Image: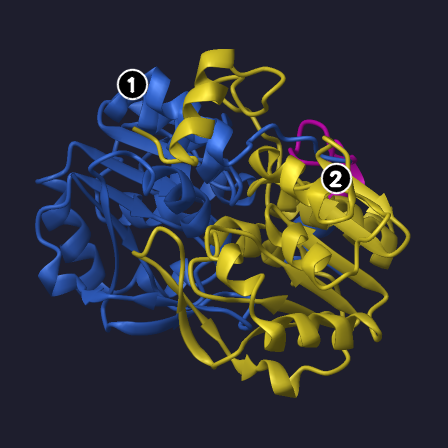
Chain colours: A yellow, B blue
């Protein structure tokens, strides 16, 4: 089973690495990090690069596609080569998935038209404007399309996907291996629970923490 | 404020990237990934490499040190150059931290002797044998030493650390940016909640999911 994770300049590291940490542990899974140009791909915070091992042209029929988000999504929305690649590999996948603003890329490729999907909370309106039916849930599954909310939601998506791909027992084993027993010290992780003025402030700065 | 994250062959990606995603967003923070030899450093699952930007010799006085874990920890425990580096930079830090089996490295460097600390659940006995006082909590703080349990616990550690370094308001903002509102689909994330036979099985395989 091949799992392809797309990388591009200024993606958000945890969008990709959270799911990777889960999915790479499925027995028989082969994860491939792919980008337009192989080599180090820099994240949005600039101080980290992940290596893309193979060019998009060499990834033609993955079983699972995962598209991370990040500020760099905006540039990819206008990159016809990337959108063509997404459409092409989607024809082969059994699951097409995204984390955070990665769902905007799937929508731009026309893959989410009329489908229920989610994204980072700050992107839900844009997702709707692009033809999807935005749902403010942490993970949304519509047919073979599974989308996750912002950044850390990719971990929850990946565990659910693992259950579908390999069974609950394998998913539970992986959850225990990565000791995923979250204990956030604050309750500000969603727009439903965070102080309203904090939400407003981050909307105003475009998620830059001041 | 310089935050140094140590990389070494066969570290676990999420141990490093979870905290990175949080800590890199603190205003004024500069994160540096460092390794004995700069360049791509391969994770335990082999299909991913993160780039170490600078050699250990160029990181001499970080404010915060973060040591991830992974199967590769075992080799580092015998690497005197790495242990010397840990002891040297610890003299400069305001926080010395670890995720998962990274605490074994801190212990091997003599930094946790007599201190309360945690680690991946499978490593707690070894941590005790190395002179620390093992505590099966998700995050343990003893003086300037903050240790986290396995893999995903680094996210909780980093949010707590952010609160101490930059205040609760900044930590809450970052939690909302990364939409950290975890909703694990299973309750197998700790030895306290996972089926006992699953814990036994993973102990027997050394965390390899069968």
Q: Residue at image x 82%, y 54%?
A: A145
Residue A44 on the magenta span: no
Q: In this view, does A190 lie to the left or right of A138?
A: left
On the image, the x and y values in percent for residue B55 come to 18, 67
Q: Quadrant of the N terminus of chain B?
A: top left
On the image, the x and y values in percent for residue A180 come to 62, 38
Secondary structure mostly seen in magenta is loop
Output the chain of dot 1. Answer: B
Residue B205 figure quarter: bottom right
Same chain for mark 2 and mark 1? The answer is no
CB contact under 8 Å: marks 2 and 1 = no
- Please, what secondary structure does the residue beneath circle 1 have? loop
Judge whether B110 appears above or below B9 on screen.
above
**Res B177 label:** none
On the image, the x and y values in percent for residue A43 come to 40, 58
Q: In this view, does A92 lie to the left or right of A101?
A: right
Q: In which quarter of the image is the C terminus of chain B?
A: bottom right
- Count residues near mark 2 (Cα–Cα under 10 Å), then give few for <14, some for 14-19, many for 20+: many
Q: Which of B140 and A147 is in front in this view?
A: A147
Output the chain of dot 2. Answer: A
Q: Is residue A134 left or right of residue A180?
A: right
Q: Which of A49 and B186 is in front in this view?
A: A49
Total marks placed: 2
Q: What stretch is highlighted in magenta?
A: B187-200
**Res B167 label:** 1
Residue, far right: A143
- Please, what secondary structure does the residue beneath circle 2 have? strand
Determine if residue A156 is in view. Answer: yes
Q: Residue at image x 64%, y 46%?
A: A154
**Res A139 label:** 2
Q: Distance between the residues labelled 2 and 1?
A: 30 Å
């Amino acid at each position: 089973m091949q799992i392809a994770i797309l990388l591009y300049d200024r993606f958000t590291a945890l969008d990709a690495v959270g799911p990777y940490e889960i999915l790479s542990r499925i027995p028989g899974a082969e994860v491939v990090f792919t980008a337009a140009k192989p080599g180090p791909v820099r994240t949005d915070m600039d101080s980290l690069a992940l290596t893309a091992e193979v060019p998009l042209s060499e990834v033609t029929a993955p079983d699972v596609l995962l598209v991370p988000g990040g500020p760099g999504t905006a540039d990819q929305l206008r990159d016809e080569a990337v959108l063509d690649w997404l459409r092409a590999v989607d024809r082969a996948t059994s699951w097409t998935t995204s984390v955070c603003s990665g769902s905007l890329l799937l929508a731009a490729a026309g893959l989410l038209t009329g489908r229920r999907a989610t994204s980072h909370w700050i992107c839900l309106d844009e997702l709707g404007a692009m033809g999807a039916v935005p749902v403010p849930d942490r993970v949304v599954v519509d047919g073979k399309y599974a989308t996750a909310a912002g950044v850390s939601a990719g971990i929850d998506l990946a565990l659910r996907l693992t259950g579908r791909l390999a069974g609950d027992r394998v998913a539970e084993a992986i959850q225990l291996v990565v000791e995923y027993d979250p204990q956030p010290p604050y309750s500000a992780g969603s727009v439903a629970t965070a102080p309203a003025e904090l939400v407003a402030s981050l909307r105003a700065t475009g998620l830059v923490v001041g």
